[in-house]
Image (tube, coloured by chain):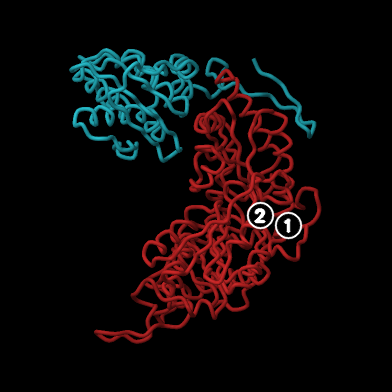
Protein backbone atom coordinates (compact mmCIF):
# COMPACT_ATOMS: atom_id res chain seq x y z
CA UNK A 1 0.00 0.00 0.00
CA UNK A 2 2.42 2.61 -1.19
CA UNK A 3 1.04 6.01 -2.08
CA UNK A 4 2.67 8.13 -4.71
CA UNK A 5 3.14 11.83 -4.74
CA UNK A 6 4.77 14.36 -6.94
CA UNK A 7 6.84 17.07 -5.31
CA UNK A 8 7.19 20.60 -6.64
CA UNK A 9 10.39 19.46 -8.32
CA UNK A 10 8.34 17.05 -10.36
CA UNK A 11 10.29 14.20 -8.80
CA UNK A 12 8.09 11.20 -8.12
CA UNK A 13 8.58 9.50 -4.83
CA UNK A 14 6.95 6.63 -3.06
CA UNK A 15 5.68 6.93 0.48
CA UNK A 16 7.53 4.20 2.36
CA UNK A 17 5.49 1.80 4.41
CA UNK A 18 7.09 1.37 7.79
CA UNK A 19 4.94 -1.62 8.80
CA UNK A 20 7.16 -4.70 8.84
CA UNK A 21 4.43 -6.68 7.07
CA UNK A 22 5.13 -4.48 4.04
CA UNK A 23 8.72 -5.71 4.01
CA UNK A 24 10.01 -2.38 5.30
CA UNK A 25 12.35 -1.73 8.18
CA UNK A 26 9.43 -1.56 10.55
CA UNK A 27 10.13 -4.55 12.74
CA UNK A 28 11.70 -2.72 15.70
CA UNK A 29 9.16 0.06 15.21
CA UNK A 30 6.28 -2.41 15.33
CA UNK A 31 7.72 -3.83 18.51
CA UNK A 32 7.62 -0.35 20.04
CA UNK A 33 4.21 0.61 18.72
CA UNK A 34 2.20 -2.61 19.14
CA UNK A 35 -1.42 -2.42 18.03
CA UNK A 36 -2.52 -2.44 21.69
CA UNK A 37 -0.25 0.56 22.36
CA UNK A 38 -1.59 2.48 19.36
CA UNK A 39 -5.13 1.70 20.49
CA UNK A 40 -4.50 3.15 23.96
CA UNK A 41 -2.79 6.12 22.30
CA UNK A 42 -5.76 6.82 20.02
CA UNK A 43 -8.41 6.25 22.70
CA UNK A 44 -6.77 6.89 26.04
CA UNK A 45 -8.68 5.56 29.05
CA UNK A 46 -8.83 7.08 32.49
CA UNK A 47 -9.27 10.67 31.34
CA UNK A 48 -12.66 11.17 33.02
CA UNK A 49 -12.72 13.39 36.12
CA UNK A 50 -13.04 11.60 39.47
CA UNK A 51 -15.99 12.24 41.76
CA UNK A 52 -13.54 12.88 44.59
CA UNK A 53 -9.80 13.66 44.44
CA UNK A 54 -7.75 12.72 47.51
CA UNK A 55 -4.32 13.50 46.11
CA UNK A 56 -2.71 14.56 42.85
CA UNK A 57 0.73 15.11 41.37
CA UNK A 58 2.30 16.59 38.25
CA UNK A 59 5.03 14.83 36.35
CA UNK A 60 7.52 16.27 33.90
CA UNK A 61 9.89 14.69 31.41
CA UNK A 62 12.62 17.27 30.82
CA UNK A 63 13.90 15.37 27.78
CA UNK A 64 10.84 16.24 25.71
CA UNK A 65 8.82 18.65 27.85
CA UNK A 66 5.95 16.21 28.30
CA UNK A 67 3.71 16.77 31.30
CA UNK A 68 1.11 14.58 32.93
CA UNK A 69 -1.15 15.05 35.91
CA UNK A 70 -2.37 12.10 37.96
CA UNK A 71 -5.29 12.41 40.37
CA UNK A 72 -6.29 9.61 42.73
CA UNK A 73 -9.24 8.66 44.92
CA UNK A 74 -8.24 6.47 47.86
CA UNK A 75 -10.59 4.38 50.00
CA UNK A 76 -8.78 2.90 52.96
CA UNK A 77 -5.97 0.78 51.54
CA UNK A 78 -7.50 0.69 48.08
CA UNK A 79 -6.89 2.88 45.03
CA UNK A 80 -10.52 3.55 44.16
CA UNK A 81 -9.99 5.70 41.09
CA UNK A 82 -7.28 7.22 38.88
CA UNK A 83 -7.39 10.02 36.35
CA UNK A 84 -4.44 10.65 34.03
CA UNK A 85 -4.34 13.84 31.96
CA UNK A 86 -1.71 15.87 30.17
CA UNK A 87 0.07 15.69 26.87
CA UNK A 88 2.70 13.28 25.78
CA UNK A 89 3.90 11.04 23.01
CA UNK A 90 2.17 7.81 22.01
CA UNK A 91 4.22 5.78 24.48
CA UNK A 92 3.53 8.14 27.38
CA UNK A 93 -0.18 8.42 26.55
CA UNK A 94 -0.60 4.66 26.15
CA UNK A 95 1.28 3.98 29.35
CA UNK A 96 -0.94 6.44 31.26
CA UNK A 97 -4.08 4.91 29.77
CA UNK A 98 -2.97 1.40 30.72
CA UNK A 99 -2.03 2.63 34.18
CA UNK A 100 -5.52 3.98 34.77
CA UNK A 101 -7.12 0.73 33.63
CA UNK A 102 -4.78 -1.57 35.49
CA UNK A 103 -4.51 0.15 38.86
CA UNK A 104 -8.05 1.39 39.55
CA UNK A 105 -9.58 -0.82 42.23
CA UNK A 106 -6.31 -2.46 43.31
CA UNK A 107 -5.05 -2.53 46.90
CA UNK A 108 -2.06 -0.28 47.55
CA UNK A 109 0.50 -3.11 47.84
CA UNK A 110 -0.66 -4.46 44.46
CA UNK A 111 -0.38 -0.98 42.88
CA UNK A 112 3.21 -0.68 44.05
CA UNK A 113 4.02 -4.24 42.93
CA UNK A 114 2.60 -3.45 39.49
CA UNK A 115 4.61 -0.23 39.23
CA UNK A 116 7.79 -2.10 40.19
CA UNK A 117 6.96 -4.94 37.81
CA UNK A 118 6.46 -2.50 34.95
CA UNK A 119 9.74 -0.81 35.82
CA UNK A 120 11.41 -4.24 35.71
CA UNK A 121 10.02 -4.85 32.22
CA UNK A 122 11.31 -1.52 30.91
CA UNK A 123 14.76 -2.20 32.32
CA UNK A 124 14.87 -5.69 30.88
CA UNK A 125 14.64 -7.42 34.28
CA UNK A 126 12.51 -10.46 35.16
CA UNK A 127 9.04 -9.66 36.50
CA UNK A 128 7.93 -11.42 39.71
CA UNK A 129 5.48 -14.26 38.86
CA UNK A 130 2.68 -12.81 41.01
CA UNK A 131 2.54 -9.62 38.92
CA UNK A 132 0.05 -9.66 36.01
CA UNK A 133 0.97 -6.91 33.58
CA UNK A 134 -2.05 -7.28 31.30
CA UNK A 135 -1.98 -4.74 28.44
CA UNK A 136 1.22 -3.26 29.89
CA UNK A 137 2.98 -6.30 28.47
CA UNK A 138 2.61 -4.60 25.07
CA UNK A 139 5.05 -1.88 26.17
CA UNK A 140 7.84 -4.46 26.58
CA UNK A 141 9.35 -3.25 23.27
CA UNK A 142 10.15 0.12 24.84
CA UNK A 143 13.07 -1.52 26.69
CA UNK A 144 15.00 -1.54 23.40
CA UNK A 145 14.70 2.24 23.03
CA UNK A 146 16.57 3.67 26.02
CA UNK A 147 15.42 7.23 25.49
CA UNK A 148 11.76 6.18 25.40
CA UNK A 149 11.84 4.36 28.76
CA UNK A 150 11.29 7.71 30.46
CA UNK A 151 8.24 8.34 28.25
CA UNK A 152 6.68 5.10 29.49
CA UNK A 153 7.60 5.75 33.13
CA UNK A 154 6.31 9.32 33.33
CA UNK A 155 2.71 8.47 34.38
CA UNK A 156 4.03 5.90 36.86
CA UNK A 157 6.50 8.14 38.68
CA UNK A 158 3.71 10.70 38.84
CA UNK A 159 1.29 8.16 40.32
CA UNK A 160 3.90 7.12 42.87
CA UNK A 161 4.36 10.78 43.78
CA UNK A 162 0.61 11.28 44.24
CA UNK A 163 0.34 8.17 46.44
CA UNK A 164 3.37 9.21 48.48
CA UNK A 165 1.81 12.60 49.02
CA UNK A 166 -1.44 10.94 50.11
CA UNK A 167 0.31 8.52 52.47
CA UNK A 168 2.44 11.19 54.13
CA UNK A 169 -0.14 13.95 54.01
CA UNK A 170 2.33 16.29 52.29
CA UNK A 171 1.83 18.20 49.09
CA UNK A 172 3.32 16.57 46.01
CA UNK A 173 6.15 18.28 44.19
CA UNK A 174 6.74 17.77 40.51
CA UNK A 175 7.76 14.20 39.72
CA UNK A 176 10.53 13.89 37.19
CA UNK A 177 11.62 11.01 35.02
CA UNK A 178 15.20 12.18 35.66
CA UNK A 179 15.06 10.33 38.98
CA UNK A 180 14.58 7.08 37.08
CA UNK A 181 17.71 4.96 37.03
CA UNK A 182 19.09 4.78 33.50
CA UNK B 1 17.23 42.99 2.38
CA UNK B 2 19.71 45.55 3.60
CA UNK B 3 22.79 43.36 3.57
CA UNK B 4 25.09 46.11 4.70
CA UNK B 5 23.51 46.55 8.10
CA UNK B 6 22.86 42.97 9.13
CA UNK B 7 26.45 41.94 9.56
CA UNK B 8 25.30 38.53 8.45
CA UNK B 9 25.16 38.48 4.69
CA UNK B 10 22.40 36.42 3.25
CA UNK B 11 24.30 35.88 -0.01
CA UNK B 12 23.06 36.44 -3.50
CA UNK B 13 21.26 34.43 -6.12
CA UNK B 14 18.10 32.41 -5.59
CA UNK B 15 19.26 29.16 -7.12
CA UNK B 16 21.00 26.23 -5.51
CA UNK B 17 24.62 26.61 -4.49
CA UNK B 18 27.27 26.25 -7.11
CA UNK B 19 28.38 22.87 -5.84
CA UNK B 20 27.18 19.32 -6.05
CA UNK B 21 25.98 18.28 -2.60
CA UNK B 22 25.66 14.65 -3.56
CA UNK B 23 29.24 14.52 -4.80
CA UNK B 24 30.30 16.24 -1.58
CA UNK B 25 28.76 13.35 0.41
CA UNK B 26 31.57 11.14 -0.88
CA UNK B 27 33.96 13.14 1.27
CA UNK B 28 32.02 12.42 4.50
CA UNK B 29 32.53 8.70 5.23
CA UNK B 30 29.66 8.37 7.75
CA UNK B 31 27.14 9.43 5.11
CA UNK B 32 27.83 6.16 3.31
CA UNK B 33 26.43 4.06 6.14
CA UNK B 34 23.01 2.47 6.36
CA UNK B 35 20.65 3.05 9.28
CA UNK B 36 17.81 0.57 9.83
CA UNK B 37 18.25 -0.69 6.28
CA UNK B 38 18.11 2.75 4.66
CA UNK B 39 20.65 5.27 3.42
CA UNK B 40 21.44 7.64 6.30
CA UNK B 41 19.68 10.96 5.71
CA UNK B 42 21.35 13.21 8.23
CA UNK B 43 19.22 16.25 9.09
CA UNK B 44 20.50 17.05 12.57
CA UNK B 45 23.28 19.43 11.58
CA UNK B 46 22.24 22.12 14.05
CA UNK B 47 23.12 19.65 16.82
CA UNK B 48 26.39 18.59 15.25
CA UNK B 49 27.69 18.19 11.72
CA UNK B 50 29.41 15.18 10.20
CA UNK B 51 33.15 15.25 9.58
CA UNK B 52 34.92 15.06 6.22
CA UNK B 53 37.61 12.40 5.76
CA UNK B 54 40.21 15.18 5.70
CA UNK B 55 39.37 16.04 9.33
CA UNK B 56 39.52 12.41 10.42
CA UNK B 57 42.87 12.03 8.66
CA UNK B 58 44.25 15.21 10.21
CA UNK B 59 43.21 13.97 13.65
CA UNK B 60 44.93 10.64 13.16
CA UNK B 61 47.97 12.25 11.54
CA UNK B 62 48.43 14.45 14.59
CA UNK B 63 48.46 11.49 16.99
CA UNK B 64 50.56 9.32 14.67
CA UNK B 65 53.21 11.90 13.84
CA UNK B 66 53.19 15.05 15.94
CA UNK B 67 51.64 14.35 19.34
CA UNK B 68 53.23 16.46 22.08
CA UNK B 69 52.17 19.15 24.51
CA UNK B 70 52.08 22.70 23.23
CA UNK B 71 54.12 25.81 24.01
CA UNK B 72 56.53 24.11 26.40
CA UNK B 73 59.06 22.05 24.56
CA UNK B 74 62.04 22.60 22.34
CA UNK B 75 61.88 19.19 20.75
CA UNK B 76 60.59 18.64 17.23
CA UNK B 77 57.25 17.12 18.20
CA UNK B 78 56.49 19.95 20.62
CA UNK B 79 57.32 22.41 17.89
CA UNK B 80 55.02 20.64 15.42
CA UNK B 81 52.18 20.34 17.93
CA UNK B 82 52.42 24.01 18.85
CA UNK B 83 52.51 25.01 15.23
CA UNK B 84 49.43 22.87 14.40
CA UNK B 85 47.51 24.26 17.39
CA UNK B 86 48.40 27.86 16.56
CA UNK B 87 47.57 27.26 12.89
CA UNK B 88 44.00 26.55 14.03
CA UNK B 89 43.89 29.90 15.82
CA UNK B 90 45.15 31.73 12.71
CA UNK B 91 42.66 29.98 10.44
CA UNK B 92 39.73 30.75 12.72
CA UNK B 93 40.80 34.41 12.94
CA UNK B 94 40.92 34.61 9.16
CA UNK B 95 37.60 32.78 8.78
CA UNK B 96 35.65 35.34 10.82
CA UNK B 97 37.70 38.35 9.73
CA UNK B 98 39.69 38.95 12.93
CA UNK B 99 42.93 40.71 12.02
CA UNK B 100 45.01 39.30 14.86
CA UNK B 101 45.14 35.61 15.92
CA UNK B 102 45.41 36.79 19.54
CA UNK B 103 41.75 37.73 19.20
CA UNK B 104 40.88 34.01 19.20
CA UNK B 105 40.63 32.16 22.53
CA UNK B 106 40.31 28.41 22.12
CA UNK B 107 37.77 26.82 24.47
CA UNK B 108 36.00 23.46 24.78
CA UNK B 109 32.86 24.59 22.98
CA UNK B 110 30.63 27.62 22.37
CA UNK B 111 29.03 27.16 25.79
CA UNK B 112 32.40 27.48 27.52
CA UNK B 113 33.18 30.58 25.45
CA UNK B 114 29.90 32.20 26.57
CA UNK B 115 30.52 31.24 30.19
CA UNK B 116 34.00 32.74 29.93
CA UNK B 117 32.52 36.10 28.95
CA UNK B 118 29.76 35.89 31.57
CA UNK B 119 32.21 35.10 34.37
CA UNK B 120 35.37 36.80 33.14
CA UNK B 121 33.85 40.03 31.87
CA UNK B 122 30.68 39.84 33.97
CA UNK B 123 32.78 39.98 37.15
CA UNK B 124 32.88 43.75 36.77
CA UNK B 125 29.07 43.98 37.07
CA UNK B 126 26.91 44.29 40.16
CA UNK B 127 23.48 45.35 41.47
CA UNK B 128 21.90 48.01 39.28
CA UNK B 129 23.55 46.68 36.13
CA UNK B 130 21.41 44.99 33.49
CA UNK B 131 22.01 42.21 31.00
CA UNK B 132 19.68 42.06 28.01
CA UNK B 133 19.20 38.63 26.43
CA UNK B 134 16.51 37.39 24.04
CA UNK B 135 13.64 34.94 24.41
CA UNK B 136 14.98 32.85 21.55
CA UNK B 137 18.37 32.00 23.08
CA UNK B 138 19.76 28.52 23.47
CA UNK B 139 20.29 27.60 27.14
CA UNK B 140 24.02 28.19 26.59
CA UNK B 141 23.33 31.90 26.10
CA UNK B 142 20.75 32.07 28.90
CA UNK B 143 22.03 30.06 31.84
CA UNK B 144 25.45 31.78 32.16
CA UNK B 145 23.57 35.09 32.49
CA UNK B 146 21.13 33.59 35.01
CA UNK B 147 24.18 32.47 37.01
CA UNK B 148 25.70 35.94 36.74
CA UNK B 149 22.43 37.49 37.94
CA UNK B 150 22.36 35.10 40.89
CA UNK B 151 25.97 35.66 41.86
CA UNK B 152 26.29 39.38 41.33
CA UNK B 153 22.75 40.72 41.70
CA UNK B 154 22.61 41.81 38.07
CA UNK B 155 19.13 42.28 36.56
CA UNK B 156 18.18 40.19 33.52
CA UNK B 157 15.91 41.62 30.81
CA UNK B 158 14.55 39.84 27.76
CA UNK B 159 13.88 40.92 24.18
CA UNK B 160 10.55 39.34 23.20
CA UNK B 161 9.99 37.24 20.10
CA UNK B 162 7.23 38.29 17.69
CA UNK B 163 4.51 36.03 16.30
CA UNK B 164 6.58 35.56 13.14
CA UNK B 165 9.52 34.31 15.22
CA UNK B 166 11.70 37.40 15.00
CA UNK B 167 13.14 39.69 17.64
CA UNK B 168 10.95 42.65 18.57
CA UNK B 169 13.47 45.39 17.82
CA UNK B 170 11.19 48.18 19.02
CA UNK B 171 10.95 46.44 22.39
CA UNK B 172 14.71 45.90 22.29
CA UNK B 173 15.16 49.66 21.91
CA UNK B 174 12.89 50.33 24.88
CA UNK B 175 14.66 47.77 27.07
CA UNK B 176 18.10 49.25 26.39
CA UNK B 177 19.18 52.00 28.77
CA UNK B 178 22.11 53.45 30.64
CA UNK B 179 22.05 50.48 33.02
CA UNK B 180 22.42 47.94 30.19
CA UNK B 181 25.97 46.60 30.27
CA UNK B 182 25.66 43.50 28.11
CA UNK B 183 23.43 42.51 25.18
CA UNK B 184 23.63 38.76 24.48
CA UNK B 185 22.03 37.49 21.27
CA UNK B 186 22.22 34.55 18.87
CA UNK B 187 23.23 35.32 15.30
CA UNK B 188 20.78 32.62 14.25
CA UNK B 189 18.14 30.79 16.29
CA UNK B 190 18.71 27.06 16.66
CA UNK B 191 14.94 26.49 16.83
CA UNK B 192 13.36 29.09 14.55
CA UNK B 193 16.23 29.48 12.11
CA UNK B 194 15.75 33.25 12.37
CA UNK B 195 18.76 35.28 11.25
CA UNK B 196 18.93 38.21 13.64
CA UNK B 197 19.90 41.73 12.47
CA UNK B 198 23.12 41.81 14.49
CA UNK B 199 24.58 45.06 13.30
CA UNK B 200 21.30 46.86 13.99
CA UNK B 201 21.19 45.45 17.51
CA UNK B 202 24.88 46.21 18.03
CA UNK B 203 24.31 49.79 16.91
CA UNK B 204 21.50 50.21 19.45
CA UNK B 205 23.67 48.64 22.15
CA UNK B 206 26.60 50.89 21.34
CA UNK B 207 24.44 53.98 21.83
CA UNK B 208 23.95 53.02 25.48
CA UNK B 209 27.51 51.77 25.91
CA UNK B 210 26.64 48.08 26.25
CA UNK B 211 28.92 45.24 25.21
CA UNK B 212 27.51 42.86 22.56
CA UNK B 213 27.95 39.10 22.99
CA UNK B 214 26.99 37.01 19.96
CA UNK B 215 26.28 33.29 20.03
CA UNK B 216 27.45 32.36 16.56
CA UNK B 217 27.18 28.58 16.94
CA UNK B 218 24.44 28.23 14.30
CA UNK B 219 25.52 31.05 12.00
CA UNK B 220 29.30 30.77 11.57
CA UNK B 221 29.21 27.43 9.72
CA UNK B 222 26.30 28.42 7.47
CA UNK B 223 26.60 32.11 6.52
CA UNK B 224 29.32 34.54 5.54
CA UNK B 225 29.97 36.28 8.85
CA UNK B 226 32.49 39.01 9.50
CA UNK B 227 33.32 39.95 13.09
CA UNK B 228 33.59 43.67 12.40
CA UNK B 229 30.38 43.76 10.32
CA UNK B 230 28.37 42.11 13.10
CA UNK B 231 29.41 44.78 15.57
CA UNK B 232 30.00 42.06 18.16
CA UNK B 233 32.42 42.62 21.02
CA UNK B 234 32.51 38.88 21.63
CA UNK B 235 31.61 36.07 19.25
CA UNK B 236 31.30 32.45 20.41
CA UNK B 237 31.04 29.35 18.25
CA UNK B 238 32.15 25.72 18.11
CA UNK B 239 34.15 23.57 15.72
CA UNK B 240 31.85 20.55 15.83
CA UNK B 241 28.93 22.43 14.27
CA UNK B 242 31.30 23.51 11.49
CA UNK B 243 32.30 20.02 10.27
CA UNK B 244 35.18 19.90 12.76
CA UNK B 245 35.83 17.72 15.82
CA UNK B 246 33.96 17.95 19.12
CA UNK B 247 35.72 19.48 22.11
CA UNK B 248 36.88 22.72 20.49
CA UNK B 249 35.17 26.09 20.62
CA UNK B 250 36.18 29.69 20.18
CA UNK B 251 35.73 33.05 21.77
CA UNK B 252 36.66 35.77 19.32
CA UNK B 253 36.68 39.43 20.27
CA UNK B 254 38.40 42.76 20.01
CA UNK B 255 41.77 42.76 21.76
CA UNK B 256 40.75 45.62 24.01
CA UNK B 257 37.65 43.78 25.17
CA UNK B 258 39.46 40.47 25.63
CA UNK B 259 42.05 42.28 27.77
CA UNK B 260 39.18 43.15 30.11
CA UNK B 261 38.24 39.49 30.60
CA UNK B 262 39.50 38.18 33.93
CA UNK B 263 40.90 34.64 33.82
CA UNK B 264 38.31 32.15 35.05
CA UNK B 265 40.61 29.11 35.19
CA UNK B 266 44.05 29.20 36.81
CA UNK B 267 46.88 26.82 36.08
CA UNK B 268 49.62 26.11 33.62
CA UNK B 269 50.04 28.18 30.48
CA UNK B 270 47.91 31.11 31.65
CA UNK B 271 50.61 32.56 33.94
CA UNK B 272 53.75 34.62 33.48
CA UNK B 273 55.28 34.37 36.93
CA UNK B 274 54.13 32.32 39.90
CA UNK B 275 55.17 32.65 43.53
CA UNK B 276 53.77 30.58 46.37
CA UNK B 277 51.25 33.27 47.24
CA UNK B 278 50.77 35.28 44.07
CA UNK B 279 50.97 35.10 40.30
CA UNK B 280 50.90 37.34 37.27
CA UNK B 281 49.01 36.50 34.11
CA UNK B 282 50.30 35.62 30.68
CA UNK B 283 49.36 37.63 27.58
CA UNK B 284 46.32 37.03 25.41
CA UNK B 285 45.11 34.57 24.37
CA UNK B 286 47.02 32.17 26.65
CA UNK B 287 45.88 34.05 29.76
CA UNK B 288 42.38 32.64 29.14
CA UNK B 289 43.48 29.09 28.20
CA UNK B 290 44.65 27.34 31.36
CA UNK B 291 46.05 23.81 31.18
CA UNK B 292 46.69 21.50 28.27
CA UNK B 293 44.13 22.29 25.59
CA UNK B 294 42.43 19.93 23.14
CA UNK B 295 45.42 20.02 20.82
CA UNK B 296 44.59 17.20 18.42
CA UNK B 297 41.04 18.32 17.73
CA UNK B 298 42.13 21.92 17.26
CA UNK B 299 44.86 20.73 14.90
CA UNK B 300 42.27 18.87 12.82
CA UNK B 301 39.76 21.73 12.55
CA UNK B 302 41.45 23.67 9.72
CA UNK B 303 40.75 20.71 7.43
CA UNK B 304 37.03 21.42 7.98
CA UNK B 305 37.48 25.11 7.24
CA UNK B 306 39.30 24.08 4.05
CA UNK B 307 36.07 22.47 2.86
CA UNK B 308 33.95 25.52 3.72
CA UNK B 309 36.43 27.91 2.09
CA UNK B 310 36.69 25.73 -0.98
CA UNK B 311 32.89 25.86 -1.36
CA UNK B 312 32.70 29.53 -0.44
CA UNK B 313 30.41 30.78 2.32
CA UNK B 314 28.22 32.72 -0.13
CA UNK B 315 27.64 29.46 -1.99
CA UNK B 316 27.01 27.57 1.25
CA UNK B 317 24.39 30.12 2.23
CA UNK B 318 22.78 30.02 -1.24
CA UNK B 319 22.70 26.22 -1.15
CA UNK B 320 21.02 26.06 2.25
CA UNK B 321 18.61 28.86 1.44
CA UNK B 322 17.50 26.99 -1.67
CA UNK B 323 17.05 23.83 0.40
CA UNK B 324 14.98 25.67 3.00
CA UNK B 325 12.83 27.24 0.27
CA UNK B 326 12.18 23.78 -1.15
CA UNK B 327 11.51 22.32 2.31
CA UNK B 328 8.99 25.03 3.20
CA UNK B 329 7.16 24.39 -0.10
CA UNK B 330 7.06 20.65 0.41
CA UNK B 331 6.02 20.84 4.06
CA UNK B 332 3.24 23.26 3.12
CA UNK B 333 2.02 20.70 0.58
CA UNK B 334 1.55 18.18 3.40
CA UNK B 335 -0.93 20.50 5.07
CA UNK B 336 -1.78 20.94 8.76
CA UNK B 337 1.84 21.23 9.89
CA UNK B 338 2.72 24.20 12.07
CA UNK B 339 5.99 25.70 10.81
CA UNK B 340 7.87 27.77 13.36
CA UNK B 341 9.91 30.86 12.55
CA UNK B 342 9.90 33.28 9.62
CA UNK B 343 8.49 31.90 6.38
CA UNK B 344 10.73 34.14 4.26
CA UNK B 345 13.86 32.10 3.39
CA UNK B 346 15.83 35.36 3.23
CA UNK B 347 15.31 35.80 6.95
CA UNK B 348 16.13 32.30 8.07
CA UNK B 349 19.03 29.91 7.92
CA UNK B 350 19.16 26.27 6.94
CA UNK B 351 16.82 24.68 9.44
CA UNK B 352 13.08 24.17 9.82
CA UNK B 353 11.22 23.36 13.06
CA UNK B 354 7.66 22.14 12.80
CA UNK B 355 4.86 20.46 14.72
CA UNK B 356 2.23 18.01 13.54
CA UNK B 357 -1.08 18.60 15.31
CA UNK B 358 -1.71 14.87 15.71
CA UNK B 359 1.70 13.26 16.14
CA UNK B 360 4.08 13.94 18.99
CA UNK B 361 7.62 14.99 17.91
CA UNK B 362 9.15 11.92 19.59
CA UNK B 363 6.87 9.60 17.67
CA UNK B 364 7.57 11.41 14.39
CA UNK B 365 11.33 11.22 14.98
CA UNK B 366 11.03 7.54 15.86
CA UNK B 367 9.28 6.71 12.59
CA UNK B 368 11.78 8.83 10.63
CA UNK B 369 14.65 7.00 12.34
CA UNK B 370 13.19 3.67 11.23
CA UNK B 371 13.67 5.05 7.70
CA UNK B 372 17.26 6.14 8.33
CA UNK B 373 16.34 9.82 8.68
CA UNK B 374 18.00 11.64 11.60
CA UNK B 375 16.09 14.67 12.89
CA UNK B 376 15.88 16.17 16.34
CA UNK B 377 12.75 16.08 18.48
CA UNK B 378 12.64 17.96 21.72
CA UNK B 379 12.98 21.39 23.25
CA UNK B 380 16.33 22.03 21.53
CA UNK B 381 17.82 23.47 24.74
CA UNK B 382 15.50 26.46 24.42
CA UNK B 383 12.74 25.88 26.98
CA UNK B 384 11.71 29.55 27.32
CA UNK B 385 11.23 29.77 23.56
CA UNK B 386 9.19 26.55 23.58
CA UNK B 387 6.90 28.11 26.17
CA UNK B 388 6.60 31.17 23.94
CA UNK B 389 5.66 28.92 20.99
CA UNK B 390 3.20 27.01 23.16
CA UNK B 391 4.77 23.68 22.19
CA UNK B 392 6.48 21.28 24.61
CA UNK B 393 8.72 20.17 21.78
CA UNK B 394 9.15 20.39 18.01
CA UNK B 395 10.72 18.34 15.25
CA UNK B 396 13.69 20.07 13.67
CA UNK B 397 15.34 19.28 10.35
CA UNK B 398 18.61 21.14 9.95
CA UNK B 399 20.78 21.15 6.87
CA UNK B 400 24.45 20.97 6.04
CA UNK B 401 26.45 21.37 2.86
CA UNK B 402 25.97 17.69 1.94
CA UNK B 403 22.16 17.71 2.03
CA UNK B 404 20.12 18.01 -1.14
CA UNK B 405 16.54 17.81 -2.36
CA UNK B 406 16.58 14.00 -2.17
CA UNK B 407 17.01 14.35 1.59
CA UNK B 408 14.06 16.74 1.82
CA UNK B 409 11.96 14.34 -0.29
CA UNK B 410 12.91 11.49 2.06
CA UNK B 411 11.83 13.63 5.02
CA UNK B 412 8.47 14.49 3.49
CA UNK B 413 7.82 10.87 2.49
CA UNK B 414 8.74 9.86 6.04
CA UNK B 415 6.23 12.32 7.46
CA UNK B 416 3.54 10.85 5.23
CA UNK B 417 4.51 7.38 6.40
CA UNK B 418 4.25 8.50 10.03
CA UNK B 419 0.78 9.89 9.45
CA UNK B 420 -0.34 6.63 7.95
CA UNK B 421 1.32 4.68 10.77
CA UNK B 422 -0.44 6.60 13.49
CA UNK B 423 -3.65 6.64 11.51
CA UNK B 424 -4.06 10.38 11.42
Dot 1 alpha-carbon crowd within 10 angstroms: few under 14, some 14 to 19, many 20 or more: many
Q: Chain of mark 2?
A: B
- Residue A86: x and y in percent read 44, 28
On screen, residue B273 versus residue B135, left or right, reads left
Residue at point 69% right, 44% down? B22
Which residue is nearer to you in this view: B351 or B146?
B146
Q: Residue at x 31, y 16 (%)?
A: A81
Pointer 2 with pointer 1, Cβ within 8 A: yes
Provide the residue designation for mark 2.
B195
Q: Is residue A179 above or below residue B336?
A: below
* Image mark for residue A59: none
Is residue B26 in view? Answer: no
B264 in relation to B54, above or below:
below
Q: Secondary structure at mark 2?
A: loop
* Residue pictured at 70% horizontal, 59% vertical: B313
- Using the image, name the chain to which the residue with label 1 belongs: B
Pick the residue in front: B57 or A152.
Answer: A152
Of the numbered discs 2 and 1, the one sitting upstream in the chain is 1
**Image position of B234 (left or right of B73):** right
Query: What residue is shown with label 1?
Result: B10
Please tell me in which quadrant of the rendered image residue B195 appears. bottom right
The red chain is: B
Q: Nearer the viewer, mark 2 or mark 1?
A: 2
Can you tell which chain is drawn cyan?
A: A
Please state the horizontal and vertical placement of residue B302, each as a whole percent of the image.
57, 65
Image spot of residue B176 (x, y percent): 58, 65
Amino acid sequence: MSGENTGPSGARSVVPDVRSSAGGAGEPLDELYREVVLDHHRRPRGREPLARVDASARGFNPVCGDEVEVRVAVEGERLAGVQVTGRGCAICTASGSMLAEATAGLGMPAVHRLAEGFRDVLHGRAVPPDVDLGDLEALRGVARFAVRVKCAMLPWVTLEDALRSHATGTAAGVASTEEEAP
Amino acid sequence: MAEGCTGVQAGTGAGAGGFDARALRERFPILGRMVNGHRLVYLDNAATTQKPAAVLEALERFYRLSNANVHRGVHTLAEEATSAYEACRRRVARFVGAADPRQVVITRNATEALNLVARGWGSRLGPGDEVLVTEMEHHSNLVPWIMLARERGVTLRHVPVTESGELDLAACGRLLGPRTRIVAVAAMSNVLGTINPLSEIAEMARRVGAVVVVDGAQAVPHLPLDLAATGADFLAFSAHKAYGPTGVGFLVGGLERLEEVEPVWGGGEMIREVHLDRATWNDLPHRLEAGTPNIADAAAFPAALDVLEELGMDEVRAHERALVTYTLERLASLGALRIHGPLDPERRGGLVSFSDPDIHPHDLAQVLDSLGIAVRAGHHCAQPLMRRLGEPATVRASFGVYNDRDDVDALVDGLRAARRYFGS
